[in-house]
Amino acid sequence: MQLEPIPDHLQEDLKILFVGFNPSIRSSETGFHYANPNNRFWKILDEAGLTPRKYRPEENCGLLTLGYGLTNIVARPTKEAAEISKEEYMEGAKLLEQKIRKFRPKAVCFVGKGVYQQFSKRKAVSWGLQKDPVIPGAVEYVAPSSSGLVRMKLDDIVEIYSGLNNYN
């Protein structure tokens, strides 16, 4: 069975563009970003004060009205990010850079250190604002993955995402 990529939600003048690894199987089946019930993305945005309430995956395009966009570094859905090849990451990083340059969001939030490591080709990455952005003048922000597999406490994750309120 061929899994379908899910559509990006992009427009000009975004406050924040959220960039994930790639769609999950569940997201591919539903067509919605962060649709796996174990994914905490929607809860994190709500608890960090980025959304006025907890959105559901099927409302993902509603984030555009808040000034938030959604995309992934790789479009191909997989069960886990480990299935993504180096070539897919390289191609995805190029396409992502083109999207960022075209839509010029106020901030780009990489949902997972690994996403930013693949984009920036840097091994040492800290949480939050990146001092030396890949794209000069861009605000590049790294937050933990929202996957339920992440072993950080939810409160610690929410605190990192709360820093995005500076770009809201």
Image: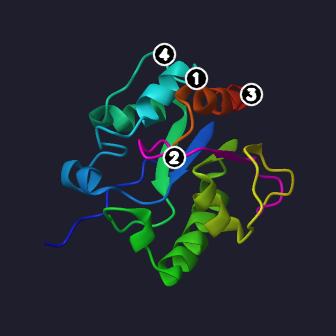
The mark closer to the camera, 2 or 1, is 1
* Cα–Cα gap, marks 4 and 1: 10 Å
Residue 66: % across, % down:
51, 28
Look at label 3 and name its amino acid.
Asn
* Magenta span: 134-150
Q: Earlier in the sequence, mark 2 or mark 1?
A: 2
Q: Magenta includes 142?
A: yes
Task: Find numbered disc 2 in the image and state the secondary structure of the residue it sits on.
Answer: loop
| Mark 3, residue position | 166
Name the side, left or right, on which 136 lies relative to 105: right
| Mark 2, residue position | 11
* Cα–Cα gap, marks 3 and 2: 20 Å
Task: Find numbered disc 1 in the image and state the secondary structure of the residue it sits on.
Answer: loop
- Check the picture and name the quadrant holding the N terminus: bottom left
Residue 160: % across, % down:
67, 33
Instruction: Give the residue drawn at x 38%, y 40%.
Output: 39
- Check the picture and name the quadrant holding the C terminus: top right
Q: Earlier in the sequence, mark 3 or mark 4?
A: 4
Residue 133: % across, % down:
80, 57
Task: Find numbered disc 4 in the image and state the secondary structure of the residue it sits on.
Answer: loop
Mark 3 neighbour density, 10 Å: few (under 14) some (14–19) many (20 or more): few
| Mark 4, residue position | 52
Look at label 1 and name its amino acid.
Ala
Name the side, left or right, on which 155 lies relative to 104: left
* Cα–Cα gap, marks 2 and 1: 23 Å
Instruction: Give the residue drawn at x 35%, y 68%.
Output: 76
Q: Magenta includes 148?
A: yes
| Mark 1, residue position | 48
Name the side, left or right, on which 30 lies relative to 157: left
Instruction: Give the residue drawn at x 30%, y 42%.
Output: 35
